[in-house]
Image (spheres, rainbow, N blue to C red):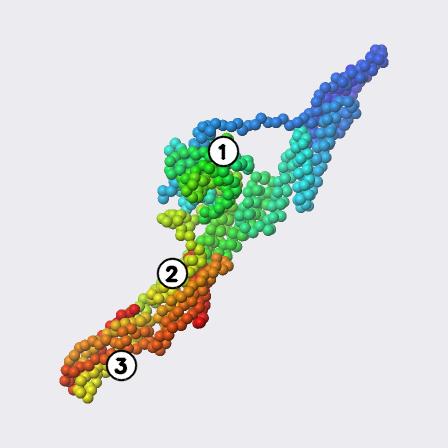
Amino acid sequence: MYEKNVNEETLAIKKEAEQAALKGKYEKAESMLSEAIEKRPDFTALQKDLTSVRSVLVMNNDLNKVAEYIKNSRLEEAQTSLTTIQKQIYNEQSQLSVTLLPKVERLTSKITIGEINNQLKHLTNIDELADKLNTLSGLDLKEAARARSKINEKIVSIAAKKAEAAMADKQFNEAIATVDEGLQYVVNNEKLIQLKNRVKQEQQAFEQRQEERIKHAMEKAAEEDLMNRKHAVKVLEVKASKDKYGDIKVTGEVGSEATKIVSSIKVTFELKNKDDEVVKTDTAEVYPMYVNPGDKGKFEKMYYELKEEEVTVNITNVEWYVE
Amino acid sequence: MDRRWLISLIVMLLCIGAGIGGSVYVKNSVPKQLEASSKLSQPVSKQASKTMAKSTQDIIYESQKLVVQIELKNGSIGSGFLYNKKGDVITNAHVVANAKEVTVVTADSKEMKGEVIGISRTTDVAVVRVPGLKDRSPLPIDTNADVELLTEVLALGSPLGLQNTVTTGEISGLNRNFELAPFTYENVYQISAPISPGNSGGPLLNGKTGEVIGINSAKLGQETIGFSIPILDILPMVKKWSQSPMKELPEFPELKAKGEKNTPVHSTDADQATYVVQYFYDSINQGDFVTAYSLLGSKWQSNTSYEEFRASYNQKLSATIDHIVADPVEGEKVEVTAFVTAEETKTGSVEMKKYKYHYVVGFENDQMKIISGSGEQI
């Protein structure tokens, strides 16, 4: 009867120990099982249980070491031991060893996060940073959240910097596109939204100034054109004289103040007698036909039939073409 | 416990008469009656594979209801698919670029209003929220990153505006990279299923499980080659938009010119720079100094008024380019060297002079401008 009771007890302890182990209380399970084995040393199930618990204890210790490595940023060592432990768990594939898996997963995540944190300072483009965001997106740890916000911060600052540079080059749409790229990852970021508005304002101001300059240029060009058409050719000298045969000769000189070549200059004039009566109205052509800016041209006309003693010449019109 | 011990003791005492032999027997045989297996060392029971292959017919029937056609006011059409319970539809960015309000047509021809709540400037993906689709269960997404070559796939969408078309094929290439401005396609799947314009934005399904593995996108050339963006690459970004919709959408100026669609004349920056300088001299020779001035960069214009610029050509009758060379330099700029023969007037006579000019040409507010210039007589 006594022995039977011992059997029952042993079974009870075994059950309790197993439950404790599955809940992760490996040490408690170990001491309970050891105690039970002393009473029933030949009970192989107890032995098996104890072996499992002890192996898990070792692995659990190793995992704690991994955690320590991670804390000290010794990520490579952490990864190496973790891989070994993972292999062990995979080899055992026992009900008990799989209870370590959540911890393994957590540590894997922490290593990933640690690696990302280490790489962060070397990453200088938005694309690469966004890749890291993708990697972190599945991880539900507070470290991941911290790394994410660090990355977001970096994306914002890189986007802002690139946008400022583009803006300095007056490449406003490029600047906006850069800000928008940042905003697709760091949605609705206040700083970037403000920057975008500023770029738009500057672009508008730039375009307005540009427009004003061109408008001014067009006005000036119109003035120049008007000047070339209406006022560019000046009569510098004109006179009517009588030669020894009694013929009247009209000569004159014009100068071009035009900014373009002018051609076919025609000078219209009238000849008056001493009573101030117009005796002749005529037109003379200036030669050369083309007059460069700043150059001069001459004209000349002879009158054999005029019998007046004295004539004066008076320019009434000058015409020309602007080339 | 104590009581049990006591009882055991009494029982033992009572049993003394039974003799030592019997006792020995009990001691040896009872422990052997302990029968139980070690629970802790038991192997993990393998779970029965849950993903039973569905029939293609079932997959198509179930999926089609969750694929929509997206129409823009300007008449362009694309596809999209429901991916969460909020009524959010994933599509291509190029389908909904520069639009906020879109019309969504479901498989049963119901028209609904949708609003773009997120769009990428660099990846060809966007999300449209359709309140009318809220609470509908979405297309399942394949969360397993491994897609292998020759995986059978189904491409759903409304090519050419024909609603609900399914094309079958297989993954014929992995990790393809290319650019179709303004979007970069990274590590995309190449699929043997043909993708036509209206199919853009539709889902690529695993032919066995019916789960979404990609978003069908660009098509290059005339052959029936389609591409699909891996869903897992864009899912985190897309989820973020669903979680916090964009208050302001980016604009795509480069996609606005719908008239001369997709056929930009492909010229290099150097070609364009040469053209700008040539055009500058043509304008000068035409006497169109305003146009010539307008080709100068903002800094040059700010430092040199039009009058000064104009006056610098007062003595020049003509200026013709004999020879022109363009070299791209740093920062997307081009250095253009022009050898110019100029006719100049000097106190009535015309002189011919040769000049060598260096111009830096580059983009300013998306227009190519002559940023700076210097020259010398030769």
Question: Height in image: B141 above or below B297?
Answer: above
**Of helix, strand and loop, which one carries label 2?**
helix
User: x, y (%) of residue A245?
Assistant: 18, 87
- Disc 1 marks which residue? B152
**Of helix, strand and loop, which one carries label 1?**
strand
Residue placed most toward the observer, B108 or A86: A86
Residue placed most toward the observer, A76 or A198: A76
Quick one: label 3, few (<14), some, or many (20+) residues within 10 Å? Answer: few
Labels 2 and 3 in the same subunit: yes
User: x, y (%) of residue A11?
Assistant: 72, 21
Give how far apart the Cα atoms at labels 2 and 3 are: 44 Å
Give how far apart the Cα atoms at labels 1 and 2 are: 58 Å
- Disc 3 marks which residue? A237
For marks 2 and 3, the one nearer the N-term is 2
Q: What amino acid type is highlighted by mark number 3?
A: Glu
Question: Height in image: B341 above or below B215?
Answer: below
The residue at the point 28 percent across, 76 percent down is: A288
Q: Quadrant of residue B164?
A: top left
The residue at the point 49 percent across, 54 percent down is: A163
In which quadrant of the rendered image does the N terminus of chain A lie? Answer: top right
Left or right of residue B158, residue A232 in this image: left
User: x, y (%) of residue B57?
Assistant: 45, 28
Q: What amino acid type is highlighted by mark number 2?
A: Glu
Quick one: label 1, few (<14), some, or many (20+) residues within 10 Å? Answer: some
Q: What amino acid type is highlighted by mark number 1?
A: Glu
- Disc 2 marks which residue? A211
